Amino acid sequence: MYYNQSAGERIKRLIQMQPAISQLIIVNVVVWFALALVKLAGFLLEPMGSGGDQLWLDSAIKWIAVPASIHNLITKPWTLITYMFVQEGFWHLFFNMIWLFWFGKIFMEFMPGKKIYTLYFIGGIAGALTYILAYNTFPVFRNTIEMSTTIGASASVLAITIATAVLVPDYSVLLLFLGQIKIKYIALFMVILDVLMIRSGNAGGHFAHIGGAVSGALFILFIRKDVAQRFGLKGFQTFISGLFQRKKLHKVHTKGRPLTDEEYNRRKVMKQQNIDHILDKISRSGYASLSAEEKEILFNSSKNN
């Protein structure tokens, strides 16, 4: 039984069931752990009371946090990617990963698994660009722009949250003390909260969250209209997913004869068209409108990707 398994066995089972989500979580945890070691080294190697632990941590983070200043960004362009895997505190990491697992799992029930990689990166980049745009537009940030940076997976996680809510808005989850809640209301609450919290001490972070949220909604609208294929973004999606997934060797045989490349590609296109038709049906009429056969096709597609 599952409940009789050890913690290690449960973690292994979760990784096997949700490899895409697990890989994203693992990268975030590894980065957090590495920064924790840097902070520990600063504590041990600097005089007591010098604040060496925080100094060492700040020195490391400045190379991977995305800056608000466009000039600083030009000198460190990689931070558009690295910042979205950086959480400084344990609770920052914990809650981001809980939300990533929770909504990522729902998202992957209805979308082929590799799309979550693309969405994670698009949400993170959109969040960073929104943050940079806000700091270079609004006068309130003028005196702090050169020293401001932001980190965190929140923009990516919120992109997945909003994308899931746009994809299946009436999907319900059970919340403690609140009962069954449709995820569209959870997503709406998160966006409103971020807008209202802009005046807090983490204004840049909330702008990044909003950018991630908008990108998540647009991502689903693009998928429905097949904009990715029209504008050549399929290659970007394949590249991102390839960073996390090992290549699979396709050995397809029919009645003892291997398929030619042309036959294999034709079959692959037909399969994708079938998946797209099912996703369109979900967007129009909801998941409940699918037949048992369509649900099985969608499940197998998500499992194989």
Image (spheres, grey):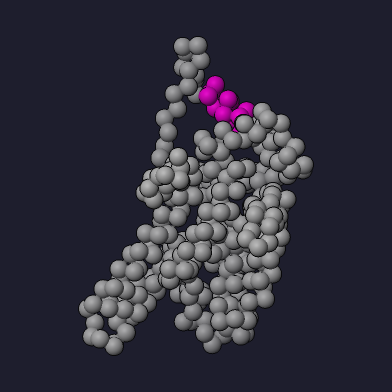
242, 36: nearer the viewer: 36
Q: Residue at the spot x=72%, y=35% of the render?
A: 290
**Residue 52 position within the rendered picture, expressed as x and y whole percent measured from the top left:** 29, 82
Task: Name which quarter of the figure residue 301 lies in.
Answer: top right
Q: In the image shown, does 19 or 209 lie closer to the viewer?
A: 19
Q: Percent from the top left, x then y, of residue 291?
A: 71, 31
Q: Is residue 296 visible?
A: yes
- What percent of the width, then of the height, locates residue 76? 42, 68
244 in relation to 37, above or below: above
Q: Residue at x 58, y 77 (%)?
A: 203
Magenta-tinted stretch: 262-273
Q: Give the residue at x 48% y 42%.
A: 17
Magenta span: predominant SS is helix
Residue 267 on the magenta segment: yes
Q: Which is nearer the eye, 215 or 239? A: 215
Q: Quadrant of the N terminus?
A: top left
Based on the picture, tell me whether residue 180 belongs to the magenta stretch: no
Percent across and percent down for residue 191 are 67, 66
Q: Is residue 74 visible?
A: no
View extreme (right): residue? 285
Q: Is residue 270 above or below residue 281?
A: above
Seen in the picture, residue 4 relative to 301 is either above or below; the reply is below
Residue at image position (43%, 65%) is 86
The number of numbered discs placed on residues in the rendered structure image is: 0
